[in-house]
Image (cartoon, rainbow, N blue to C red):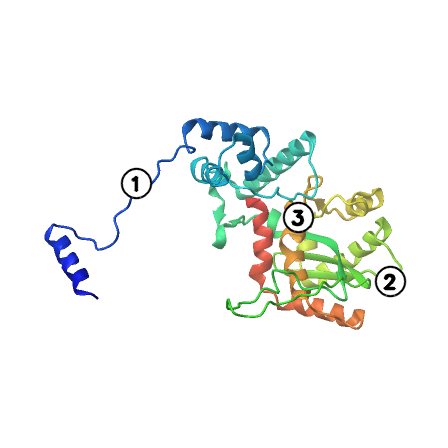
């Protein structure tokens, strides 16, 4: 340091100054960021939620930086994508969801002998745990397409890189046309039946009843006593599931059907809990034959922990 700078610092300290940094300067007073412009910006955004910062600045004849400050700092707006939902529910659909799941909550209360759901325990991770006949006897299942070549997702292909690292390129890969349809039936203990649809066949009521026959035999072998206690089956409202032939099969064997609201994959454990991790596990894999793919499916299901399946069933109550 120069001697003059040392003398200057000593003078400042003698005057009682405690900081050696530059003191803040008042600068030019802000004239655009005022209450009037804030109100005008808020009115424009409320009229058109898709209006851009540049358009607002041109309309109000104020700098873009000022508009940006008003929108983000003063008004607290942030621009987000719309949430994707599989189906636009009507008011009747929404009312049906409420009525069905209110009845199921009452069923849980009756099985537990409680007057309200506050006595139903909460397990690890915030999932409700209901130790009652409904969830002990519940079997859920659904169908899904599984491709012999499933591309890796963009999220799964992310890697750590330094700022100086070369740009990583990822080529677009299409899913293979060769695929099989798998029907997975499972409960809180694990997979009971993995049924693969043969090539050239389609899922209809007759084929689904045939799957139910195999499921009944699998329950007899893997879940002794469940058929005697009574099976509670949870599946969606797909045409093969709701066909008259299927309903007659279920009535003949006395299986109870858990009500399921229309267009509600968020309330189907296979959709919100099982198939997502399955597809992520298959991401980036390529199989030569269907037998290799089926073998990988069986190995993946066998290696899952019981807590994984129990968490999917118990999460129904919290949902």
Q: Nearer the viewer, residue 11 or 81?
A: 11
Residue sitting at 73 percent across and 47 percent down? 255
Q: Is residue 138 visible?
A: no
Horizontal and vertical percent position of residue 154: 64, 60
Which quadrant is the N terminus positioned in?
A: bottom left
Horizontal and vertical percent position of residue 202: 86, 54
Residue sitting at 58 percent across and 64 percent down? 158
Horizontal and vertical percent position of residue 205: 84, 49
Would you call the spot at circle 3 few (<14 residues within 10 Å), some (14-19), or many (20 or more)?
many
Extreme left residue here? Answer: 14
- Give the secondary structure at mark 1: loop
Q: Nearer the viewer, residue 194 or 281?
A: 281
Residue 123 position (above or below residue 104): below
Q: Which residue is mark 3?
A: 268
**CA distance for labels 2 and 1:** 77 Å
Using the image, tell me which numbered label, if any, was put on residue 26: 1
Residue 15 position (above or below residue 158): above
Residue sitting at 75 percent across and 69 percent down? 293
Q: Nearer the viewer, residue 144 or 39?
A: 39
Q: Earlier in the sequence, mark 2 or mark 1?
A: 1
Q: Which residue is mark 2?
A: 199
Which quadrant is the C terminus positioned in?
A: top right
Horizontal and vertical percent position of residue 207: 84, 54
């Amino acid at each position: 340091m120069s001697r003059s700078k040392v003398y200057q610092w000593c003078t400042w300290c003698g005057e009682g100054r405690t900081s050696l940094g530059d003191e803040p300067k008042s600068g030019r007073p802000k004239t655009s960021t005022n209450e009037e412009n804030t109100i005008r910006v808020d009115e424009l955004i409320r009229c058109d939620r898709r209006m851009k910062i540049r358009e607002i600045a041109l309309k109000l004849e104020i700098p873009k930086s000022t508009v940006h400050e008003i929108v983000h700092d003063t008004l607290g707006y942030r621009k987000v994508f719309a949430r994707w939902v599989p189906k636009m529910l009507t008011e009747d659909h929404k009312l049906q969801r409420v009525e069905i799941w209110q009845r199921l909550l009452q069923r849980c209360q009756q099985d537990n002998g409680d007057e309200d759901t506050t006595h139903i325990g909460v397990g690890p991770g915030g999932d409700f745990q209901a130790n009652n006949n409904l969830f002990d006897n519940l079997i859920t299942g659904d169908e899904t397409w599984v491709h012999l070549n499933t591309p890796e997702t963009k999220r799964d292909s992310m890697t750590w890189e330094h700022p100086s690292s070369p740009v990583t390129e990822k080529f677009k890969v299409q899913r293979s046309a060769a695929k099989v349809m798998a029907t997975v039936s499972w409960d809180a203990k694990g997979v009971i039946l993995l049924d693969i649809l043969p090539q050239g066949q389609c899922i209809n009521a007759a084929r689904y009843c045939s799957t139910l026959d195999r499921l009944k035999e699998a329950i007899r072998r893997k879940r002794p006593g469940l058929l005697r206690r009574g099976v509670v089956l949870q599946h969606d409202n797909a045409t093969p599931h709701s066909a008259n032939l299927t309903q007659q099969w279920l009535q003949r064997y006395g299986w109870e059907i858990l009500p399921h609201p229309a267009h509600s994959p968020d309330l189907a454990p296979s959709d919100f809990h099982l198939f997502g991790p399955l597809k992520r596990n298959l991401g980036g894999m390529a199989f030569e034959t269907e037998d290799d793919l089926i073998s990988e499916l069986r190995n993946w299901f066998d290696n899952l922990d019981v807590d994984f399946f129990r968490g999917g069933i118990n999460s129904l109550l919290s949902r």
